[in-house]
Amino acid sequence: MNELSIILLVEDNPDDAELIKYAFQKVGIRNPLVIVTDGDAAVDYIGRTGVYADREGLPLPELILLDLKLPRRSGFEVLSFVRQHETARHTPVVVLTSSDQEKDICRSYEGGANSFLVKPIGRDGLIDMARALKAYWINLNHGVAL
Amino acid sequence: MSEAGKSEPELLRQHTVFAQFGELALRSDNLDEILTESCRLVGEGLGTDLAKVVELQDDGKTLLVRAGVGWKPGVVGKATIKLEDDTSEGYALKSGKPMTSSNIETETRFRYPPFLIENGAKAVVNVIIIGGKDRPPYGLLQVDSREPREFTESDTAFLSGYANLLAATVDRFRLIQEVREREAGERHALEIKVAERTAELAASNAQLDAFAYTVSHDLRAPLRAMEGFARILLDDYAAALGDSGGRYAERIVGASMRMEGLIDALLGYSRLRRQEPAARLVDPTPIVRRAVEEVQASLERPIAIDVATPLPSVMAEPIVLGQVLVNLIGNAAKFQRDGVPVQVTVRAEHRAGRVRIWVEDNGLGIAPEHQERIFNVFERLHGDETYPGTGIGLAIVREGMALMGGRAGVESDPREGSRFWIEFADTAQLAMANDDSVKPQS
């Protein structure tokens, strides 16, 4: 990923979205962050449908941060859509949820998630997590060129 | 000739029939066998090979040939007789008196069913088989003859005697059958009840799981926001907040941390109910100390908590025991009496081979009628404004102790305070088994 690569954050809770944005700023992640607040919007953004239908020039995200419990389409459905999408199917998907339930973890990996993170309680935990995301997924990891 | 004009051989034959019936009725557990054999025996007693038992059906108007000997196929179990006034069967049932016809062909009083004539019956005698107490007659014992025959009073007396014995046997079978049906019904009802209870339990466990999931998922989200934004204020906007502003923001952080604690307690309880921790011999002293520290840290100012050390080793799982103790000591510290300095004591005693740890306070105490109730989930005695809590603390205590093979209870006098106790599984066997491993290696 380079500094212009888009990160898509699928998060319905505006507080969580705001805190993640804050943590990204704190640790110096400068990539454009697109925030969609439900599963349908995530599918529309990646599939160029709905409100994103005529946005031909819109680049696809190179990292997707995905909450599981979402209005309309669930995180699992979004994941399944991404993995079947012609171009986006190799895009790293990091599940970022408040659930630490075993069945959610299993279902996420079975659906093709690349990582499973539980939203930390506390600002410090969140900043640590953002720092690690930056170091690994943005700086170290190589994705398939879009 | 003797006894009502019977010949010696006839008398002997009839006595033998009674003896054989007695033996049969005791031996057999099959009513059809008894009935069929009875037909053969009474035929033998009266010197004929044609006899039957007809059973009065529930409609009260039909007789079914239930058993018989000497009949062509299609009669036994199938042929029926409609009870009407002009049948000898109807008359016998109604009057309860034996009815005889010496020659069916010349009989003018009664009509006879066609199968009787088709089977070559020429003469017939009917005696009633009475029912049990307060019950309609069972039916009739009928002996037929292939030749016209004058049945004597002695014949009907023999037959009536036999029919009465048969009636007693038939009634015994009916009673047994009734008891069996009632037992089967009760067993069935019990099985249904057990299945219902099992389903209810599974449903309540599933509800608890769903509840725990919702709690972990949905209650934590606003908590993250409270804590997160308050800390951002403290870190990045300290100057703008000023001293009091900063203190208030710290209060928000503190409150969200407490709420996190409550959520953890709830999840802990629901997990407790699903798992089975392996209890082992542990020294409870450091666990008690940690619990005391945790409780003290949660209070605005420290209180007097005495731990009477050393505490004997107990059968426990350290994390579960920690949860249990934090809840007990926390309760002791919480439910204070106004104007009385709090004093909490933790001590242990041996009780019939088991270790009991007491957590005693001088607080509010619990009225006897509430002492059992308080161990239930979500059971609370006080409003949230006076004594905040989740209502699951003591449920964790009881559930946790049960999981470790122990139990929990309380003794309380509302004037003096409460004495909660937890009792652990017997350590004697394990202590002996572990002795070797405790010895220093040479």
Image (spheres, rainbow, N blue to C red):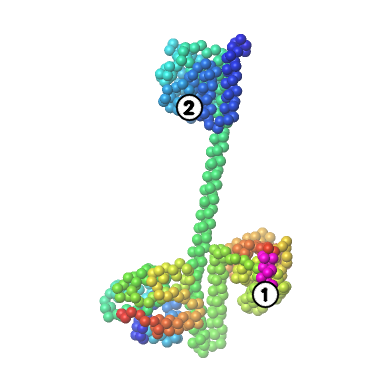
Q: Residue at x 60, y 62 (%)?
A: B376
Q: Secondary structure at mark 1?
A: loop
**Tag 2: residue type?**
Arg
Q: Residue at x 69, y 65 (%)?
A: B432
Q: Position of residue B433 (x, y in %)?
A: 67, 65
Q: Position of residue B95 (x, y in %)?
A: 53, 19
* Residue at far bottom of view: B239
CA separation in Å, label 1 and label 2: 87 Å
**Tag 1: residue type?**
Gln
Q: Position of residue B164 (x, y in %)?
A: 58, 23
Region of the chain picked out in magenta, as a range:
B430-439
Crowd rating for badge 2 (residues with CA inside 10 Å; few <14, some 14–19, many 20+): many
Q: Nearer the viewer, residue B167 or B61?
A: B167
Kindly indicate whether the residue at mark 2 contacts the one at mark 1 (C-beta within 8 angstroms): no
First reached walking from the N terminus: tag 1 or tag 2:
2
Q: Nearer the viewer, residue B313 or B214?
A: B313
Horizontal arrangement in the rendering, residue B200 relative to residue A38 (left or right): right
Visible residue check, residue B359: no
Q: Quarter holding the C terminus of chain B?
A: bottom right
Q: Nearer the viewer, residue A123 or B21?
A: B21
Q: Secondary structure at mark 2?
A: strand
Task: Find disc 1 in the rendering and name its residue.
Answer: B441
In the rendered image, the vertical position of residue B388 relative to residue B14, given as above or below:
below
Horizontal arrangement in the rendering, residue B249 relative to residue A75 (left or right): right
Horizontal arrangement in the rendering, residue B431 relative to residue A68 (left or right): right
Task: Find disc 2 in the rendering and name its residue.
Answer: B66
In the rendered image, the vertical position of residue A104 relative to residue B41, given as above or below:
below
**How would you classify the magenta stretch by its main secondary structure?**
helix
Q: Residue at x 52, y 16 (%)?
A: B47
Specify the quadrant of the image occupied by residue B387: bottom right
